[in-house]
Image (spheres, coloured by chain):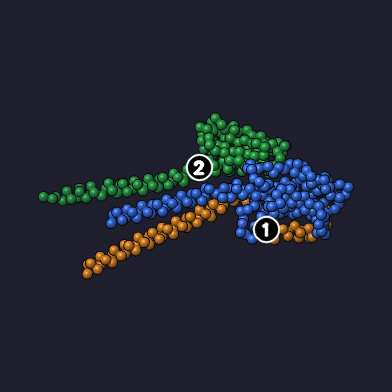
Amino acid sequence: MIRRGDLIRKKRGEILPETILFIILNLAFITILILFVAKQSGEGILIEQSYAKQISLLIDAVEPNTEVFIDMTDASEIDSVWWEDNYDSSITVDGNIITAKFREKGGYSYSFFNKVVPVFDITSEGELRMVVRNG
Amino acid sequence: MDKLISIYWFAILTIVAVAVVYMVAVFYSQPYDVREVEVNLLVNKVADCLSRGGELSSDLFYEGNFNVGYKDNFLETCGITFNTERDWIELQYYFLVEFFNIDLSDTGFFLEEGSLNLISSCDIQDEGKYERLAECVEKRFYAVSDGKQYLIKILGIVRKTEKNVN
Amino acid sequence: MSIKNNKRGQVADTITWIVATIILIVVLMVFVFIANLLAKTKKIGGLTDSLDSGGEKEADRVEVKTILAYRLNGLNKFTINNWINESET
């Protein structure tokens, strides 16, 4: 004998797991996409490129004996473990080539044409002080 | 029917995923192109070296005429270096300074440094087809020296295409 | 009669799916186009190295040299200005 309640319960049993699975898979897909985009936007190479070029252009623009302060907090957050041990060498200069490196396997270089000697002082908090001296 | 919808849904998700990955790749793979700023700074630097306070540098002249020897160490004198971070075969910079009399006649004296091959990049740019080759800027100004009036034209070019364009 | 009605409903469903797919692809193409445009905004231009000369127009660093030179010798301003402005055309 089939009772009304049996039919209702049977129908609930069929629909719910499929719907939940469908929603979960879609959410997983959206989450993976969002994480992918977020990872790309915080990619170290972009920030390294940005700072290397910014600092090079600043060196080209300023007169000797100019002091410049740059806030590089976002750079310090790329790889905080690496930053703790290597922040003082995150911005280096070799002749007239600036290299910005904020992670283990990273680094971006850009040259400046001004014949000066920039001197860098970086704190662990990500504050850069640059003094441009005569070459 | 359900299977058909599942296959269709999978196809849609794939299309969306491919589109998102492509958009991200297109946007984040494009480097920052700072050459316009850089070439302006180069031209400004050269101009500063030649003229201060409206007067041309006295080093430009020798016994009332333009000092041809000034060309020899111009980069050194002005504190400019064309070394770059990559082993490019050619220099990535160029500038040309021309001096004119007030009657617009050419004095015949000019200063030129860098790779001459970059000049053609500026002509092509005018056609609007190859904007990525190099960034060119021309600036003109007026200066005096010993009561004489001079018109100075500076053309500056920065290439560095590999570092600024995808 | 009821079978005919059912068939109409199935055709309408199919068209709905096709239209939805087309709309989805068009929207994605618009986003891809916008992403391409945004990528071009990575060209950094407009050097803001300028000095306020007190006039309406801000003078750039090289223009200031001309302004200062006029104070030393202000003759032939018309010729000089025309020649300088030639490069802007």
Residue A7 in percent (x, y) is at 18, 50
Residue A82 vertical position relative to residue B58 in the rendered view, above or below: above
Residue drawn at point x = 76 percent, y = 59 percent: C83
Residue drawn at point x = 32 percent, y = 62 percent: C14
Instruction: Give me the chain that's blue.
Output: B
Left or right: residue C35 compared with residue B48? left
Q: Amino acid at mark 1?
A: Asp
Query: Residues under labels 1 and 2: Cα distance?
Result: 39 Å
Residue drawn at point x = 35 percent, y = 53 percent: B9
Residue B103 in percent (x, y) is at 82, 59
Question: Is residue B107 shown to the viewer in this render?
Answer: yes
Chain A: colour as depicted: green
Residue of label 2: A42
Residue drawn at point x = 63 percent, y = 43 percent: B86
Q: How many residues crowd mark 2 within 10 Å: few (<14), some (14–19), many (20+)?
A: some
Left or right: residue A85 compared with residue A60? left
Query: Numbered disc 2: what chain?
Result: A
Question: Is residue A56 shown to the viewer in this render?
Answer: no
Q: Residue furthest top?
A: A85
Residue of label 1: B123
Instruction: Give me the chain that's orange.
Output: C
